[in-house]
Amino acid sequence: MTSAGLRTVSGLSGAVFLAQAVVIAVIIAQSPTQVLLPIVLRLQGNDGGIPLGRLDLGVAVIVLCALVGLARLVVVVPPVFLLYSSDVQSNRHTARWIEFAFSSSIVIFLVAQLNGISDIGTLVLSYAITSGMTLFTVLQERSPRAATERMLPLGFGAMIGIVPWGVIALHQVAALLSGQLPSALARVITLTMLAFSFAFFATHWREQRRAKTAPSLPGGESSHILLSLASTSAFAWLVVIGIIGVGNIRF
């Protein structure tokens, strides 16, 4: 893919994200249902925890789409795109990892809440660990590697990145044993986003394996953009289905 093609893909992706943010905002504003996810601080001797507030799930999804859309559109601005394109050709994806760090972390934060995790400590750690996973992918790009060498930073990143999903799985098992399993839609969202997480890793691994081939680099970036569009859009609209109760499907 050429640089012009990459710019087009990024620009269209950003426009689609912002359009979705507007449409979802209109839908949620007209919906009588509001999904508020509790956030508490759990202390020893205080079983219920100290309430810190409630997160409006609909607003969170709108903000997520808007932020990713803006991140995609910023890189198509001519002065920024020159630097962005040069970085991509050099196998440096600074803009990608900034966007991915906050978008993937926000998603894992919200997925954890949908699975009944409300403790602020667990939520913040899940957010931080997911962001930390991204740092290992950056390290992989910055580390010279012979074709026969293993991609250890990417492997370590995967090992760290799976931890929040393990915590979510643990809560699902505990909820199952106590008879308080999350809704079917929450489980669908969890499995869908877990599948996308594996897809992101596979895409990044494949790209780094081919990093020595310059023509493949813009193509790898466009693949990430499209995968990001698909995953975030799927998450956003599954949440909308739960909020407005399409087909009586609710959280």
Image: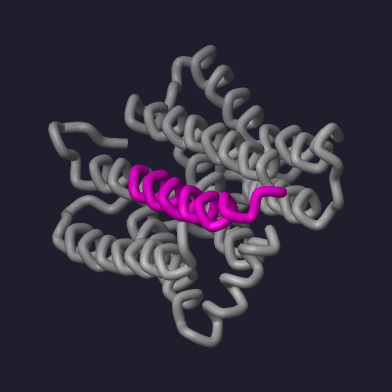
Q: Is residue 76 left or right of residue 185?
A: right
**Residue 106: in magenta span:** no
* Residue at figure coordinates x 85%, y 52% from the top left: 143
In the depicted structure, whether residue 102 falls above or below residue 112 = below
Q: Colour mode?
A: one colour
| Residue furthest out toward the top | 177
* Residue at figure coordinates x 68%, y 53% from the top left: 131
Quadrant where the C terminus sits is: top left
Between 124 and 51, the one lying in front of the other is 124
Q: Is residue 176 left or right of residue 185?
A: right
Quadrant housing residue 158? top right
Quadrant housing residue 82? bottom right
Quadrant housing residue 59? bottom left
From where the camera sits, is residue 207 visible? yes
| Residue furthest out toward the bottom | 79
* Residue at figure coordinates x 46%, y 83% from the top left: 77
Q: Position of residue 5 (x, y in %)?
A: 40, 64
In the depicted structure, whether residue 34 falls above or below residue 177 = below
Between 232 and 243, the one lying in front of the other is 232
Between 134 and 247, the one lying in front of the other is 134
* Residue at figure coordinates x 69%, y 51% from the top left: 134
From where the camera sits, is residue 125 visible? no
Q: Position of residue 17 (x, y in %)?
A: 34, 62
* Labels in figure, total: 0
Q: What's drawn in magenta, residue-wise?
A: 212-234
Q: What secondary structure is the magenta-colored segment mainly?
A: helix
**Residue 223: in magenta span:** yes
Q: Is residue 119 left or right of residue 60?
A: right
Q: Position of residue 168 (x, y in %)?
A: 58, 31
